[in-house]
């Protein structure tokens, strides 16, 4: 059974997520929190496998709470805020996943399972943006190495690695 704590400042959201997740045969919501401080306390008390963490909450925001519960518990950020700065901050803080509240109930259950299993997950739209940003980066270059300074053997290896011309 995957034990989950839901941290969201909106009571209706917490209750709805609890109903959705408790309907899954292998997921049990063991606690709720209305802010990041409560989330940290619930993790300490209940030792869940996964925390669903909203980014913006009073008292202590989700981004600030993440490093206080990781690595003891895996964090899946679940938010409406589809902004790259939140994605990067959540991942830097130690979150294992980032999902938008526009996801379906099935996607949410699958995401909880993926994160609980030790893997990482990003919402498809977030993943697409990250891949695009990564692809735009300049490729790494060998620093301080000049081709005319390579040894004979290094030149042989380089020739073997270089595709043959027409």
Image (spheres, rainbow, N blue to C red):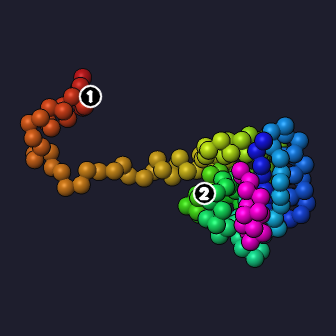
Q: Which residue is mark 1?
A: 163
Q: Is residue 142 left or right of residue 81?
A: left
Residue 49 sits inside the magenta stretch: yes
Marks 2 and 1, Cα distance to the nearest angstrom? 45 Å
Position of residue 152 measured from the top left corner of the image (x, y, whole percent): 8, 36
- Percent coordinates x, y for residue 79 in the rendering: 74, 58
Question: Please, what secondary structure does the residue beneath circle 2 have?
Answer: loop
Q: Quadrant of the N terminus?
A: top right
Label ID, residue 11: none
Query: Which residue is tagged 2?
Result: 71
Which image quarter is the C terminus in?
top left
The residue positioned 51% from the left and 52% from the top of the image is 133
109 to 43, vertically: above or below: above
From the image, give the main secondary structure of the stretch colored magenta.
Answer: helix
Q: Residue at x 86, y 58 (%)?
A: 14
Of pointers 2 and 1, the one earlier in the residue sequence: 2
> Contact, CB < 8 Å: mark 2 with mark 1?
no
Q: Which residues are magenta?
A: 36-52
Judge by depth and name the residue closer to the eye, 39 or 138: 39
Circle 1 packing at 10 Å, graded few (<14), some (14-19), many (20+), is few
Magenta-drawn stretch contains 136: no
Q: Crowding near pointer 2: few (<14 within 10 Å), some, many (20+)?
A: few
In the image, farthest residue toward the bottom: 59
Q: Is residue 85 visible?
A: no
In the image shown, does 94 or 91 lie closer to the viewer?
Answer: 94
Q: Is residue 130 above or below residue 68?
A: above
Q: Nearer the viewer, residue 123 or 113?
A: 113
Residue occupying the point 78% across, 69% down: 38
């Amino acid at each position: 059974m995957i034990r989950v704590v839901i941290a969201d400042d909106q009571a209706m959201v917490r209750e709805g997520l609890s109903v959705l997740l408790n309907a899954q045969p292998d997921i049990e919501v063991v606690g709720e929190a209305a802010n990041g401080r409560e989330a940290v306390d619930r993790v300490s008390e209940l030792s869940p496998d996964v925390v669903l963490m909203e980014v913006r909450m009073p008292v202590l925001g989700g981004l600030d709470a993440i490093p206080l519960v990781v690595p003891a518990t895996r964090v899946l950020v679940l938010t409406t805020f589809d902004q790259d700065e939140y994605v990067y901050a959540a991942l830097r803080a130690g979150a294992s996943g980032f999902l938008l509240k526009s996801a379906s109930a099935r996607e949410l259950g699958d995401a909880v399972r993926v994160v609980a299993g030790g893997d990482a997950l990003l919402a498809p739209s977030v993943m697409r943006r990250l891949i695009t940003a990564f692809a735009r980066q300049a490729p790494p270059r060998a620093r301080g190495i000049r081709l005319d300074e390579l040894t004979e053997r290094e030149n042989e290896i380089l020739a073997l690695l270089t595709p043959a011309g027409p």
